[in-house]
Structure formats: C-alpha cells, structure tokens
Amino acid sequence: MKKSEKVLLGVFAFLFLAIIGGGGLTFAFNNYMAIREENEGLRDRLGEMNLAVSQGADWADKYGWLEEHCPAFVSRQEASAKMLEAVTAEAEKMGLTIGGKEFIEAARVLGPDGLPLEENLGYFDKATVKITLTGVQEKAFFGWLHALQQPQSFLGVTRMQINPSGTSKTINAEVEFTQFYREKSVPKVSKVN
C-alpha cells in the first residue's frame, strides 16, 4: 500500500468514525434528554398525587357536607314546587307581592339513543322558576334575595333584571331562581306472589 493510499484510508476512516460517532452521540443525547423530561414529568405527577392524598380528608369532609345538605327530590316538578313555595313564603314575610311565575325547563341535549348526553349531566340537577315583581320597595326586595340565597339551601339567583318604576324607590324586577338538587330514585314496588 502506498503512503497516499494509507493517508486516504486514514482520512476516510476518521470521517467514517466522526459521522457514525457523531450520529451515535446525537442519538444518545436525544435519548438522555427525553428520559430527563420524562423524569421531570413523573416527579411533577408524584407531587400532584402526594398533594391529592394529603388533601383527601378535606375532600372527604366536603363531600360529606355536600351529601348531608344537598336537597334530594324525586322529580324536577317536586323541586320546582318546593322552590316556589320557599320563594313565595319568603316574599310574604317581606311584604312583597309576586306578579308572575313561570317555570323554566332546561333543554337537554339527547344522544342518538334518546338519553341525555353524559357531558351535559352534572353532579346536580336543577329546577328554575322566573318571578316577576312590580312596584316593590328596594330594601324589601334585596332583603328577600338575601334571605333566599343561603349556601345550605342550594337555591340561588341565576338571572336578574331590575328597572326603576319611577316612584319613591320602587322597582320592577324579573328574577330567575334556580334550585340545585340531587334526584333521588323512586323505590320500585314489586308484586309478591
């Protein structure tokens, strides 16, 4: 082998090792970075899991309070009737006269099988009623709203429109109340032979 061939062979061997070695190092570095990112993700996930476990007792207490205080009705009609009864009784206590009452039924999106879609179902069911008041005193009106909206009642104002009536601090108002509740199942009666 001539000296020029040896030099040429050495240059090609060096280039071959540089290309293969560089590719191997790049591959190894990319794998190292991917493993490092995965470790960081797992570390974050472990932190979230530890936080969830440490807060488990708090969430269990909150769930217990919710189960204890959340009203349960057999149907939307029963919930609407009880809500209207509570709203009307409180209005009478405050000396307010209710002009109009309208039950509002939420439209449920049905799937191809005719059942409500799962993503539209929440933890709570709800019933809504729209109340119209004309020429009521502001102070009595806001006292009425405050008395009705208590956390343990799961009853709240979801829409309100107030207009001045033009005479001595009286207003016209349209208020939508929503009762959040859990629908309890009706026990099935079976015939015993």
Image: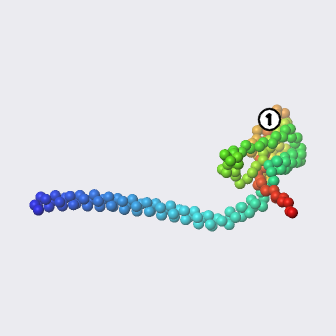
Q: Is residue 146 visible?
A: no
Q: Is residue 89 above or below residue 48?
A: above
Quarter assignment of residue 169: top right
Q: Which residue is mark 1?
A: 164
Judge the density around disc 1: few (<14), some (14-19), many (≥20) Cα neighbours within 10 Å: some
- Seen in the image, is 69 located left or right of residue 112? right
Q: Position of residue 119 (x, y in %)?
A: 66, 50
State the SS at label 1: strand
Query: Which residue is found at the position 89% from the left and 45% from the top?
Result: 92
Q: Position of residue 72 (x, y in %)?
A: 80, 56
Q: Position of residue 23 (x, y in %)?
A: 32, 58
Total labels: the figure holds 1
Query: Which residue is found at the position 33% from the left and 61% from the top?
Result: 25
Query: Which residue is found at the position 83% from the left and 50% from the top?
Result: 78
Q: Residue furthest front?
A: 193
Q: Callout 1, which amino acid?
A: Pro
- Seen in the image, is 140 located left or right of residue 15? right
In this view, the residue in front, 33 or 139, is 33
Q: Is residue 145 above or below residue 66?
A: above
- Seen in the image, is 18 located left or right of residue 65? left
In this view, the residue in front, 15 or 94, is 15
Q: Position of residue 61 (x, y in %)?
A: 71, 64
In this view, the residue in front, 4 or 45, is 4
Image quadrant where one finds the N terminus: bottom left
- Seen in the image, is 78 located left or right of residue 35? right
Q: How is the image coloured?
A: rainbow
Q: Is residue 65 above or below residue 86?
A: below
